Image (cartoon, rainbow, N blue to C red):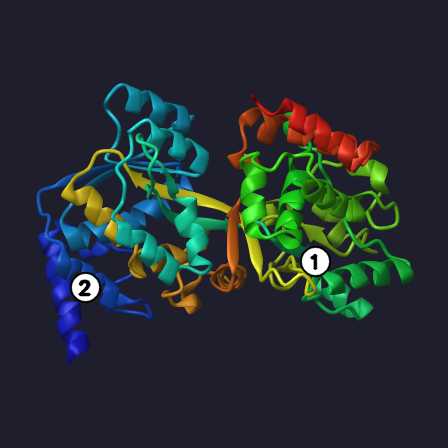
Amino acid sequence: MKTKLLVSAAALALVAGGATAQDLKFPVGEGAFNWDSYTAFDEAFNLDGQSLTIFGPWRGEDQVLVESLLAYYTAASGVTVSYSSSEGYEQQLIIDAEAGSPPDVAVLPQPGLIADLAKRGFVTPLPAETATWLSENYGAGPSWAALGTYPGPDGTPALFAFPYKADVKSLVWYSPDNFEDAGYAVPTTMEELKALTDQIVADGGTPWCIGLGSGGATGWPATDWVEDLMLRTQPPEVYDRWVSNELPFNSPEVVAAIEEFGYFAKNDSYVAGGAAAVSSTDFRDSPKGLFSSPPQCYMHRQASFIPSFFPEGTELGTDADFFYFPAYAEKDLGQPVLGAGTLAFIMKDSPAAQSFMEFLKTPIAHEVWMAQTGFVTPHTGVNLELYGSAALKKQGEILANATTFRFDGSDLMPGAVGAGSFWTAMVDYVGGKSAQEVADAIQASWPK
């Protein structure tokens, strides 16, 4: 009886919001979605006649996906939403903010840029209880609350941005068939990963494919390696001090993490083509060695987007799979995850804007996109079975079980470093310079 009542209430909300059933990708009340969260939101907010502008990074197919989600917000709240994006949306948002015509809500994948907007007074702080909510409802929750917390115009830190939609970088890709043929097991610790690396060499194979080539951005894949290894060799607080340069780039902790990358990349026996091929191999071509016969390599560390560059017809879960880039058992630093993602924030405060941020807390605001494609969330209240693929479900589980989440460090550093000297120095490192030499060069390039 309760279910029928809840569905009935939701159906009424659709009429009140001006949305029709065909606007909604999944019928309210059907399937394993958390419809209770939808109904509770609907009952809490009645904002018929109000409107909301949202400006974000999603275009093309992603815009279709986000709009399929926004239809549920409109149906429940009655708020009419206008979503837009553009090429160079980051610059456009700054221009609009400075001109006094920002959107009501914006979404960006750059926490550093949001922090700058908050410092300049262009962003409305979120209620203090939202930080508590993130800590209690996201895997590695305090990490996510910290990701959206910045000093305001008066220098007082506050939560300004709500993390929504994540990307996972701490992944190692492999061919299950090749592992099975060779009798290899998926490692669960860094110690086991290094032992497997040695075992593959002892068996006459090559463990890794690593490619840093990326045109004018050559070197960036190595920055992800170093960031992941910083989180596996140092506490997250040290990572934070490194990213802000409170801990100089040429400190022993950072030099050691670079050398950990060198353990894999500067050993001719460990990498396809030898160490000399690392910087000249395009990152888009690098994973193809997993699928050659015999395999050119057995493992490739890269983020969740890399299947886009797998050979045509590759079936995830069968031809290719991934495992979590493991942490050291002996260092007791938990299960850190490196990633990226988008954050939503209010630029023009209103009841509609506040209600949208509340909507993002509901499981249904995640599940609708989860059940389609290209969406991973650390929200621990969602039904993981709703993920649109087994690969996305595994990534969601990695996020939900993480003890620490940290955003891509190079994206948080000043552009001259994170998109400049860090890249080129990693090329110099695999080319023969020492970790200390390249770390000294990066530190010297840090803007004063």
**Can you say whether 428 is above or below 358 in the image?**
above
Residue type at mark 2: give it. Ala
**Is 154 situated left or right of 163 in this image?**
left
Query: How far across and how far down the image is residue 377, in percent?
Result: 43, 56
Q: Which mark is residue 46?
A: none
Circle 2 SS class? helix
**Can you say whether 381 is above or below 82 in the image?**
below
* Corner quadrant of residue 232: bottom right
The one of 386 and 395 positioned closer to us in this rendering: 395
Does residue 279 appear anywhere in the picture?
Answer: no
Quadrant showing the C terminus: top right
Q: Residue at x 42, y 55 (%)?
A: 142
Query: How far across and how far down the image is residue 13, in percent?
Result: 12, 58
**Can you say whether 155 is above or below 189 in the image?**
above
| Residue matched to label 2 | 40
**Is 360 situated left or right of 221 in this image?**
left
Residue type at mark 1: give it. Tyr
| Residue matched to label 1 | 174
**Is 407 situated left or right of 264 in this image?**
left
Circle 1 SS class? strand
* Corner quadrant of residue 434: top right
Q: Which numbered mark, 2 or 1, is in the foreground of this view?
A: 2
